[in-house]
Amino acid sequence: MSITENAIKPEYILEILLRRRWFVIIPFCLSMIAGIYLALTLPKIYSAETLILIEAQRVPANYVQSIVSSDINERINTLSQQIMSRTNLEKVINQFNLYSDMENEKTHMENKLATIRKNISVNVSRDRQVANAFSIRFKGTDPEKVMNVANTLASYFIDENLKLREVQAVGTSDFLEEELNTMRKRLEEVEEALKEYRREYMGELPEQLQTNLSILQGLQNNLQSRQESLRDARNRMILLNNQRAVAQNLPLPGDSSQVGSGPLTPEQMEERLTDLRARYTDQHPDVVRLKKMIADFQAKNENISGNTTEASRNDTGTGGNLLSGSQREQSEIKREIRNLEAEISELTQQITYYKKRVENTPKREQELASLRRDYENINATYNSLLGRKLEAEIAVNMERKQKGERFRVIDIARLPVNPVEPNMKRLFMMVVAAGFGIGGGLIFLLEFLDTSFRKPEDIESFLGLPILAAVPELYNRKKEVRQRLDRILSLVAIMVGFILLAGFAVLSLKGVDRTMNFIRKFVDI
């Protein structure tokens, strides 16, 4: 029974380790041997790094403004993509004969490109959130090739940066030239549209508003005068009709209660209808009633009695002399009314026309303001583009003379001495942890599965019965020799384990190459 209350006590744990010491010693020694083997056989990866400083432009920005305003991080990423393109990397591989050993001799070019891309890294250094330098690092198995490749990549970065800045400057200048020509055409089109608009809507423009209002006021005064003349003429017509009605003893034209009360001749009905129309519209009840009377009279003309007809004829005959003068005056008044109505109609049309002009003036003002605003905006844009075009030409000359921002190598790649992979310190920690971890895991598993009793107290706690007597373990000569031999072998194994640990530690801390060189020198001596 291994799981007891004493299991968590230090002396109990120490007793277990001593009893199952081989489960710790053997995995530990095997782990040390595996670690030493890995340290000696794993491929050594060396790294070389070139540090490049980002220098600001040498011409003050107050005098010449650079047009290459892209973020330095974006530009470095762009340069990295260009440098790591297939064409450039194939040149590097062929120039330095990379990956041409027996192991990689038959490797396809795509795999070589993937490997070299993985071994190249670009790290940007920042000062107050601003990139001021970056480093190019390359890793490989040959220290001299690693150094040469790192320096070559740095020169590629410098050359490509100069080309990229010049291309951006020239491209910006060309773009501004195209935009300037386009904006010039748009400016001419807007000027023509503005001139055409003023010609098309002449008379409705904002500056003509006061003139239109003055003309409209004069027309309204004329209309008012004509309307007053028309009312006077109609009043005279009504007065004349009333005089005729009194002379003929007829009902007054305005008296609707007498319409149709007495027999009237067709001529009187027509005159009455004319009078009513002069005062009312065709929908007036008197006008409608008189129209109906005329229609009924014409339809029943043959059925009217002779006495009524004769009387009406006598009445008409007695007033004939009076009607002759009034009819002429009436015709003159009617002609005057028609002329006044025609003038009023013409004046009304003119007033409507000028009112439309006045009403359209705010709309034309808004449209004209929009056209002027477009013209001013385009003109301002054109002037701005013209100034930028001149600045771009100066910036292009600055980039061609390499007076702008540039890259400069301040720390070239040097021949690496110690490999960066594998990480021997990390490997040492992992191997040591694995050696102790495997042994400890085996001991824990065996103790967990072991159900035997080690002490009398274990039996008492398990069975709940007191132990009356305990027989001690009996030793003989053979067993004593075996135990002594086991102790000696254990000490030897522990010493071997410490020797392996020391050797592995030296390899990890001092480096495999330095250690092997030291051993070679010691052997030669």
Image (cartoon, rainbow, N blue to C red):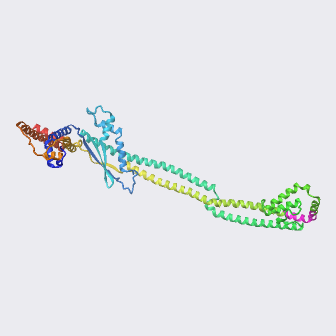
Q: Quadrant of the N terminus?
A: top left
Magenta segment includes 320? yes
Q: Quadrant of the C terminus?
A: top left
Q: Nearer the viewer, residue 335 or 213?
A: 335
Q: Nearer the viewer, residue 336 or 31?
A: 31
Residue stretch rendered in magenta on the structure: 315-331
User: Where is residue 246 drawn, in percent x and y?
Assistant: 88, 68
330 or 411, which is in the foreground? 330
- Using residue 180 as the reference point, say whether residue 408 is left or right of it: left
Q: Position of residue 392 (x, y in %)?
A: 43, 51
Magenta: main secondary structure:
helix
Number of numbered discs on residues: 0
Residue 257 in which image quadrant: bottom right
What residue appears at the point 22 percent right and 44 percent down from the top-left corner?
426
Q: Position of residue 519 (x, y in %)?
A: 13, 39
Percent of width and height locating residue 62: 38, 57
Residue 515 appearing in the image: yes
Instruction: Residue lying at the far left in this picture: please name it.
Output: 477
Q: Is residue 253 visible?
A: no
The correct choice, above or below, for 470 with respect to 264 in the image is above
Q: Does residue 418 show up magenta in the picture?
A: no
Residue 521 horizontal side relative to residue 388, left or right = left
Taking depth in this image into account, of 397 and 338 the one nearest to the observer is 338
